[in-house]
DNA sequence: GGTGTTTGTCTGACGGAGCAACTATATGCC
DNA sequence: GGCATATAGTTGCTCCGTCAGACAAACACC
């Protein structure tokens, strides 16, 4: 007996995926204009929002859904481009911090207004205030269910919980 | 003057991204067990839901947010694995159809029940029926805004457009 | 019917990201 | 102090997807 291919739940999850994919595509177009990739943007954002404008490599990986080696390479590239730097961690010589530079902050400054406009235009502005509240509520429920660690805002003790079933 | 890094709109879009990323991670874990990648799963789904179990390469690309060359490679791999096949298009000799094979349908059969369970567990079941309706409404609004073409070839608007040969 | 343009697909070269292996440092236990 | 184990980060290898370009077929226009 075959599973019903037209189960409305497939439509639902498809809608979810397509909506975010569409948004990401819009964002990517603007990032391209600034010669920056979506991951690089995310790195800049995470660093800029962190106390001291820096984050340990591992923590950065945890916040970006990148592997630690992925973070190493991204930071390599951005270091070459002058957007971030590396700093030794005084208390643990195995660790190193990624720090956003002035140039990185400037780049973020250049990108953010346009990005915010796009967020407003294609996401926030598409919904009524009530709809938006409802939506954020639901999104938070799902996010917390699926990724309980993410609730930790900046530097929370990572539980090292890997969602492998 | 720098853009406010704590603008609630950033939180909102972040929530959106993290929620779907978490869901995709859950799905990926199950796909791994079946030795299939998310894109391959999507290809199987799209083909299985298409009339005649086949789709032109270009249309497949349009439905999967993959480039046409990306589709060529995915279909290459899946062809090698016996999950799909290629069929010449009688009316246009430039085109070729990707067709899902019996083995492909069987694979889908093996994956789908578990996948549906995950969709239920981490998405549908997290929300009340009312919340879900609201959410789908909002998602549809956004999807239609950012990706107006999707309505054309998409499954859920199957009544609106018959794929032109 | 010919000629130029467009369309559909495939291929080569390239870059990004993950896994596994490796190095170096830290920690626990005796 | 000395050894076993855990943790942080980097590197080699490989896969996957994109872009640009090549090629074939269809179409438009005369």
Image: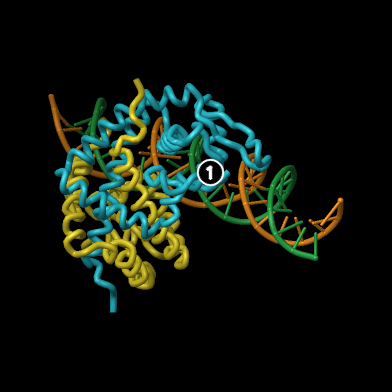
Chain colours: A yellow, B cyan, C orange, D green
Residue at (42% x, 63% y) in the render: A31
> Looking at this view, is A120 or B147 the one in front?
B147
Quadrant containing the N terminus of chain B is bottom left
Q: Locate residue D23: give its quadrant.
A: top right
* Relative side of A44 to B45, left or right: left
Q: Secondary structure beneath disc 1? A: helix
The quadrant in which residue B144 appears is: bottom left
Asked whether, in this view, residue A94 is left or right of residue A51, the answer is right
Provide residue B158's location: percent of width, then percent of height: 41, 44
Q: Which residue is mark 1?
A: B70
The residue lying at 26 percent from left, 33 percent from top is B118
Q: Which residue shows up at 53% across the image and 41% down it? A: B71
Relative vertical location of residue B27 with respect to residue B18 in this rendering, above or below: above
In the picture shown, does residue A147 fall above or below A39?
above
**In x, y percent, where is residue A162?**
25, 37
Q: Is residue A119 above or below residue A146?
A: below
Front residue of B128 and B11: B128
Image vertical order of residue A150 relative to residue B39, above or below = below
* Residue at 40% over, 42% down: B155
> What residue occupies the far bottom of the structure in this picture?
B1
Looking at the figure, which quarter contains the C terminus of chain B?
top right
Q: Evaluate whether residue A56 shows in this view.
A: no
Regarding residue A89, the answer to whether it shows in the image is: yes
């Amino acid at each position: 007996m075959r599973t019903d291919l037209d189960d409305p739940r497939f439509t639902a999850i498809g809608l979810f995926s397509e909506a975010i994919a569409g948004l990401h595509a819009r964002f990517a177009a603007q990032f391209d204009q600034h010669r920056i990739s979506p991951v690089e943007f995310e790195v800049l954002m995470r660093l800029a929002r962190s106390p001291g404008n820096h984050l340990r490599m591992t923590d950065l990986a945890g916040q970006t859904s990148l592997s630690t080696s992925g973070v190493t390479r991204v930071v390599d590239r951005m270091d070459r481009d002058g957007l971030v730097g590396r700093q030794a961690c005084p208390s643990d010589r195995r660790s190193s911090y990624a720090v956003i530079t002035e140039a990185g902050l400037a780049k973020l400054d250049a990108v953010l207004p346009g990005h915010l406009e796009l967020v407003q235009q294609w996401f926030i502005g598409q919904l009524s205030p009530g709809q938006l509240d409802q939506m954020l509520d639901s999104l938070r429920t799902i996010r917390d269910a699926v990724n309980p660690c993410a609730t930790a805002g900046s530097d929370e003790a990572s539980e090292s919980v890997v969602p492998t079933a």
